[in-house]
Amino acid sequence: MMDSRLLREVVLDQRDQFRSQPPHVIEREQLEALAGFVRSPHAVVISGVRRGGKSTLLRQIARRYYPDAAHCCLSFEDERLLHFSAADFDSLLGVFAELGGDTSVFFLDEVQVVDGWERFVRRTVDRGTKFYLTGSNASLLSREIGSRLTGRHLTIELFPFSFRECLEFASFHFDPERLHQVEYRGKLKGQFHEYLRSGGMPEYVRFGEREILRSIYADILYRDIVARHRLGDVRMLREVAYYLLSNLGNLASFNKVKGLVKAGSVNTVIRYAEYLADSYLVFTVNKLAWSVKEQLIAPKKVYCVDNGICDVVGFRFSANEGRFLENAVYLALRRTGREVFYYVAAKGREVDFVVRDGARVVGLYQVCYDLTDPDTKQREVTALTAAMAELDLDESFLLTYDDEETVRVDSKTIHVLPVYKWLLLEGQPPAAGAKP
């Protein structure tokens, strides 16, 4: 059991930090969509990459929706809470009450650090307490929530800043009525080029030091994966991560990685890739197939949570701008809360992204940096046209760095758009993504 005096000291220190407002903080896009969650009795679970803005979103929720409350908040990242266990939650409840906190609402940051946290939340939710919880491990959260909080929680995924949010941080006002102005459009494209290279990790956007991205990457590897899973072979994990981050947008070959890192089994490589995905560093995208078995055995495409991290660790932006463009589109689609796949049409014609809402296919997206070469354009249009016919869609998007037109093939329409414009005008706004 933790010493109650130390617990009280930590709570007081963190309460002051929780109330403080760091300079130049922007409201996250998810904040408005959370209004419905506030009115529900369910625990709200916010998951996402380490240092991606979850703690800041908790403070914004508190200020927006509970402005007059004495907030009951605790971050389990504090090293003084190293020995905090599930048995200490009742003591925490007592400390909050002693200090005059509003014990009807809790804000708990990185809660997955405490084994058995879900039992306390389940018991207290049943008494009418509202919880806002954050965590940086996807499968761990889903497993613990699934076992104890079924039907009592709502979840959202929080990603690094979107392009819209980066523009807001830079105090750049987007005005669609000015897109025809050459100078304005040039400045907007300059902002997009920087976003494409640097990504949207909030700390990096604020301070601009590349070492911040290396530090985040190291924290994910060592604190979220090595320490939690008690891995002995750090070298192998680093090499698996480097391979995946150096193959952005490509089909992953776990057998190839096995040989490169000299793993004893391909299952070891797959397990390490799953750890990287659980920590929100790397995403693997399945092929859309009507057979579950085919989906499982088909190669997977690889994407990263942030272009800036990928640039400092694996792929180099200057030589791979098309891959970074594709990664930015993937992240925008993932923010919608819908399922994202890749697709292979007849004759092996690959389409980068298919978006599905439940069992229904609702979007088809191909990404190509430059359509100047007529053969390249024909190849991309042919792939999209074949996929639209097979998936019974009348429209699709061909997203580029700077090309714009409308292509019609028989009754099918392909909207060719620059990614920066699609992100601001056409892309789906981020959803709260309620998943009970």
Image (tube, rainbow, N blue to C red):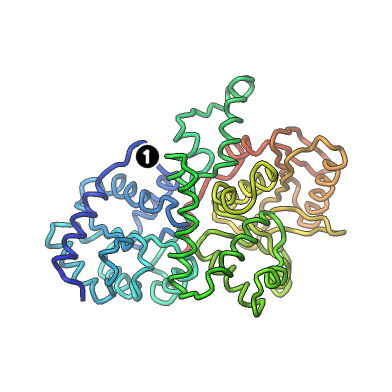
The N terminus lies in quadrant: bottom left
> In this image, 62 relative to 374: left or right?
left
Measuring from the top left, give residue 293's x and y in whole percent.
Answer: 71, 75
User: Can residue 336 be seen here?
Assistant: no
Horizontal side of residue 107 vs 258, given as left or right = left
Residue corresponding to mark 1: 25
Residue 281's image quarter? Answer: bottom right
Question: In the rendered view, would you say 54 is above or below 111?
Answer: above
Residue 294, percent from left and from top: 73, 72
Q: Residue at x 54, y 40 (%)?
A: 163
The answer to whether 27 appears left or right of 298 in the picture is left
x, y percent for residue 209: 46, 42
Amino acid residing under circle 1? Val
Is residue 396 among the parts visible in the rendering?
yes
Question: Which x, y percent locates residue 266?
Answer: 67, 76
Is 422 in front, or is 116?
A: 116
Is 418 above or below relative to 11?
above
Element type at marker 1?
loop
Place residue 374 in its image quadrant: top right
**Count of all numbered marks drawn on residues in the image:** 1
> Which residue is drawn at the image coordinates 82% and 48% (left, top)?
385
Which part of the image, by quadrant, shows the C terminus? bottom left
> Few, some or many C-alpha atoms within 10 Å of disc 1 (few <14, some 14-19, many ≥20)?
few
